[in-house]
Image (tube, rainbow, N blue to C red):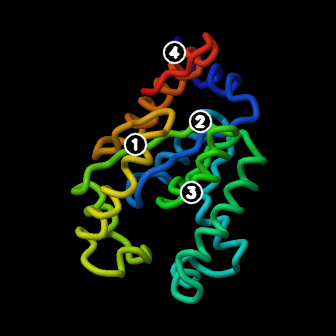
């Protein structure tokens, strides 16, 4: 099966479900997500952008004015609403998958894809922009190390894991499509395979 046929098969197998990208800030969820959506002929949605639109302010401002707990509550509601609008490729914020309720919603209405990145890759990428509220709370390297320790064991519950690294975005997209195709075939045959 060629690339186009795989994309068509995945799109058909998804039905109403969404492909949900999870991972730490800097893992490439937005950049990869846009390209993946194009290949699957689906809409791309960035949950953080939707949260900002719903709140009428930036995530940085939400964090500073209301705190992380308030943000996470809103994030949970927005992602639940977005999942009802599938199929789509949905990029979530780094902390979204830590919510048990959100994980449950994603499991029932989507296929989760963890873009797993090593610390050096994340540091290099997040250093390019100054819009990461959690990284303003101290040494970015130490913060990212702590987040890796806390979140990677939970992210490991994703249906699919793909290594995010410094290669062309299309390479990662191809790897996701291959893994999605294998996952869908396994699900069709009665058992979903983790990759």
What residue is drawn where x is 36% and y is 45%? 116
Do the residues bearing badges 2 and 3 touch, measured as CB atoms within 8 Å? no
Residue 169: assigned label: 1
- Give the SS element for disc 2: strand
Q: CA distance from mark 1 to mark 4?
A: 19 Å
Question: Can residue 121 be seen in the rendering of this structure?
Answer: yes
Q: CA distance from mark 2 to mark 3?
A: 16 Å
Residue 149, image x and y in percent?
30, 56
Which residue is nearer to you in this view: 68 or 20? 68
Judge left or right: residue 183 versus residue 110: left
Q: Is residue 134 left or right of residue 184?
A: left
Which label's residue is closer to the chain start, 2 or 3?
3
Residue at 53%, 53% in the rendered image: 97
Image height of 32 relative to 108, above or below:
below
Question: In the displayed structure, would residue 151 be above or below residue 159?
Answer: below
> Mark 2 sits on what residue?
111
Q: Which residue is mark 3?
A: 99
Question: From the viewer's perspective, is 61 left or right of 11?
Answer: left
Which of disc 2 and disc 4 is earlier in sequence?
4
Q: Can you give x and y, in whole percent of width and height, for residue 26 in the image?
A: 38, 59
Q: Read off the residue under disc 4.
A: 2
**Which comes sooner in the sequence, label 2 or label 1?**
2
């Amino acid at each position: 099966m060629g690339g186009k046929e795989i994309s068509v098969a995945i799109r058909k197998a998804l039905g109403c479900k969404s492909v949900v990208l999870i991972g730490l800030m800097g893992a490439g969820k937005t950049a990869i997500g846009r390209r993946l959506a194009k290949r699957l002929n689906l809409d791309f949605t960035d949950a953080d952008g939707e949260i900002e639109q719903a709140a009428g302010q930036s995530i940085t401002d939400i964090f500073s004015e209301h705190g992380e707990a308030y943000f996470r509550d809103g994030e949970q509601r927005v992602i639940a609403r977005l999942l009802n609008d599938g199929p789509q490729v949905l990029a979530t914020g780094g902390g979204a998958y830590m919510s048990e309720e959100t994980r449950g919603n994603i499991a029932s209405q989507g296929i989760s894809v963890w873009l797993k990145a090593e610390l050096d890759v994340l540091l290099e990428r997040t250093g390019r922009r100054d819009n990461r509220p959690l990284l303003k709370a101290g040494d970015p390297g130490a913060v990212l190390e702590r987040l890796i320790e806390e979140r990677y064991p939970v992210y490991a519950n994703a249906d699919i894991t793909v290594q995010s690294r410094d290669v062309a975005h299309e390479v990662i997209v191809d790897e996701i499509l291959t893994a999605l195709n294998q996952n869908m075939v396994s699900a069709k045959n009665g058992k979903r395979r983790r990759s």
